[in-house]
Image: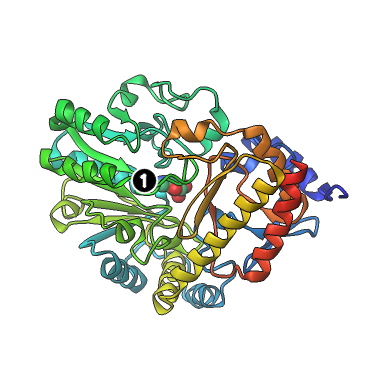
C-alpha cells in the first residue's frame, strides 16, 4: 500500500494548531489516540467524504450522528436553500419552530418541546428544569455515559473523555480540569447495567435526587445495550419523585422513529435530543410532560434562553430530515440490515485473521471492540479493549478509504446512503486491515 497523501491536511493542521487549541474545535477530531494527521474534509455527499488532498472515504462517522440520510441530501439542501432566501435569523418567533415542535411532539409523545442549539444545552437545561421542578439538588448519572460538556455532567463521562484519559478510569473526580469539586459532588455516579447498585443508591439518596439522566443505548463508551433488569430499575426511580431523563441526543430518530424510547418501550419524564433533529445544522431540544415543561420560562420559573434558538435555517434542515424519515418508514429496517451484515462480516474477517473482536450493534449503531468475544455491558468492560490494535486497524482502514470513528470508545453510524457497494468495499478493506493490524 502506498501511504496516503496528506500534504494539504498536514499543512492545514499546522495552521490550525497555531490558532486553535490542539488544532480542532472538538477533541476527538484530533486523532490523538489513533495517531496520524486528521483529514481536513473538503466536501461530503451521500455515504462519502472527500478530503483536501482529493482522497475519498466511505464515511462511518456521519458528523457523529446527524447525517442519517447521508450527506447533502437533496431534500435537506433544498429546504435550507429555500429558508435562506427569507433571511438567516430573526430573534422573533417563526413558523418553522412551530412546525418542527409539532412534528417532534407527534413522533415522540412529548407534550412540550423547547429548542436549543446543541445536545449539551439540552441536557444542561433539562437538569436545571428537573431541579427547579423537584426542588432537589442532586442528579445521578452512569459511569461512561456522556451527556455533553456542562460542568455537572463531566463526572465519570464517556466519549472524548474516555478517548483522551484512558488509564484514569474509575476515579470519582471530575473528568475535566476546571470543574469545581463542589459541582462534581452534586452528581452521583453508579454503574450502567447494574440494577441493584441503582436501587441501593435510590433507596439511600432518592429523596434528594432531582433526576436520573442516562443514555438509553450507550454510544459514548462504544455501543452498550441496556439489560431488561436495568431498564426496570430505571423505571422504579419515579417511585421516589425523581425524574427520569432519557438522553436521546445520539439515539433519537436513529434507533426507531422515536429513538431508543420507542425501541425499548421507555417512559421518561423528559427527553433530550440533538444531532439528527437538526439535520446537520446546530439544534438540540428537550421535552416531555407539560406539567414539568411548563416550569420553563417564560411560562415558569426556570430560566433558559438562546439568541439563535429555533434558528430558521436549522429548523428547516431538521424538519426536512424528520419528514424524510417519516415518509420512508422502511428506512430503519434497511439501516439495521446493513449494520447487521457489517457486524457479521467484521466478526468473520477478524476470526479469519485471528484478531480477538467483540461487535456490539443495534439499529444503525455499531462498535467493534478489540477484545475476545464476550459480553460488553459496562464502561469497565469496554475499557479492557486493546486500543493500540484498534489504532493500527483504524489507520489501515483509512489508508484503504474507510473513515471509521477515530476512537475505540465511539459508535459508528450507518446512513441511508450506504449501499451494498459500500458494504462490500468496507469488508474488503476490513479483511486486509485485520491481517495487517
Ligand atoms: C453528542 C451527545 C451529547 C452532546 O451533544 P453536543 O451537540 O455535542 O453538545 C449529549 N449526549 C449524548 C448522548 C451525545 O451523544
127 is higher (above) or lower (below) than 116: above
Query: How far across and down, in percent of the image, does residue 294 sit?
Result: 16, 54
Read off the residue under disc 1. 215
- The answer, for residue 126, to whether it is visible in the render is yes
Q: Residue furthest right?
A: 2
Q: Is residue 275 left or right of residue 357?
A: left
In the image shown, does 300 or 277 lie closer to the viewer?
A: 277
x 42%, y 21%: residue: 171
Other residues around mark 1 within 10 Å, as few (<14) / some (14–19) / many (≥20): many
Find residue 210 and report its image quarter: top left
Query: How far across and down, in percent of the image, does residue 283 sit?
Result: 42, 57
Find residue 414 and report its image quarter: bottom right
Q: Quadrant of the C terminus?
A: top right
x 31%, y 34%: residue: 194
Find residue 258 and report its image quarter: bottom left
- The kind of secondary structure element at disc 1 is loop
Mark 1 beta carbon near ligand 1 (under 8 Å): yes
Query: How far across and down, in percent of the image, does residue 331 sit?
Result: 46, 72
Amino acid at each position: 500500500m502506498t501511504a496516503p497523501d496528506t500534504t494539504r491536511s498536514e499543512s492545514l493542521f499546522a495552521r490550525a494548531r497555531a490558532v486553535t487549541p490542539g488544532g480542532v474545535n472538538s477533541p476527538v477530531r484530533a486523532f490523538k489516540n489513533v495517531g496520524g494527521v486528521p483529514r481536513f474534509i473538503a466536501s461530503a455527499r451521500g455515504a462519502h467524504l472527500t478530503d483536501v488532498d482529493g482522497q475519498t472515504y466511505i464515511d462511518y462517522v456521519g458528523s457523529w450522528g446527524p447525517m442519517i440520510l447521508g450527506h447533502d441530501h437533496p431534500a435537506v439542501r433544498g429546504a435550507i436553500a429555500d429558508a435562506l432566501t427569507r433571511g438567516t435569523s430573526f430573534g422573533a418567533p417563526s413558523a418553522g419552530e412551530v412546525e418542527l415542535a409539532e412534528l417532534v411532539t407527534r413522533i415522540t409523545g412529548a407534550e412540550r418541546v423547547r429548542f436549543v442549539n446543541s445536545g449539551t444545552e439540552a441536557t444542561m437545561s433539562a437538569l436545571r428544569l428537573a431541579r427547579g421542578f423537584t426542588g432537589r439538588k442532586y442528579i445521578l448519572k452512569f459511569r461512561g455515559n456522556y451527556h455533553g460538556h456542562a460542568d455537572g455532567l463531566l463526572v465519570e463521562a464517556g466519549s472524548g473523555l474516555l478517548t483522551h484519559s484512558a488509564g484514569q478510569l474509575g476515579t470519582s473526580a471530575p473528568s475535566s480540569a476546571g470543574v469545581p469539586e463542589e459541582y462534581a459532588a452534586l452528581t452521583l455516579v453508579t454503574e450502567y447495567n447494574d440494577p441493584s447498585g441503582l436501587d441501593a443508591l435510590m433507596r439511600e439518596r432518592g429523596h434528594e435526587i432531582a433526576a436520573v439522566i442516562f443514555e438509553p443505548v450507550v454510544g459514548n463508551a462504544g455501543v452498550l445495550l441496556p439489560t431488561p433488569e436495568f431498564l426496570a430499575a430505571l423505571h422504579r426511580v419515579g417511585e421516589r419523585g425523581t425524574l427520569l431523563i432519557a438522553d436521546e441526543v445520539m439515539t433519537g430518530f436513529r434507533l426507531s422513529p422515536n429513538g431508543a424510547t420507542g425501541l425499548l418501550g421507555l417512559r421518561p419524564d423528559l427527553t433530550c435530543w440533538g444531532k439528527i433533529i437538526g439535520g446537520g445544522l446546530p439544534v438540540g431540544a428537550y421535552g416531555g410532560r407539560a406539567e414539568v415543561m411548563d416550569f420553563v420560562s417564560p411560562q415558569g420559573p426556570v430560566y433558559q434562553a438562546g439568541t439563535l434558538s429555533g434558528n430558521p435555517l436549522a429548523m428547516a434542515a431538521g424538519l426536512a430530515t424528520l419528514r424524510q424519515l417519516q415518509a420512508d418508514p422502511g428506512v430503519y429496517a434497511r439501516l439495521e440490515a446493513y449494520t447487521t451484515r457489517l457486524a457479521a462480516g467484521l466478526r468473520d474477517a477478524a476470526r479469519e485473521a485471528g484478531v480477538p473482536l467483540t461487535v456490539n450493534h443495534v439499529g444503525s449503531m455499531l462498535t467493534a471492540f478489540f477484545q475476545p468475544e464476550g459480553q460488553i455491558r459496562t464502561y469497565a468492560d469496554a475499557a479492557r479493549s486493546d486500543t493500540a490494535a484498534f489504532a493500527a486497524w483504524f489507520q489501515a482502514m483509512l489508508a484503504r478509504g474507510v473513515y471509521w470513528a477515530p476512537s475505540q470508545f465511539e459508535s459508528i453510524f450507518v446512513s441511508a446512503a450506504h449501499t451494498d457497494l459500500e458494504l462490500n468495499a468496507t469488508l474488503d478493506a476490513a479483511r486486509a486491515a485485520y491481517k495487517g493490524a
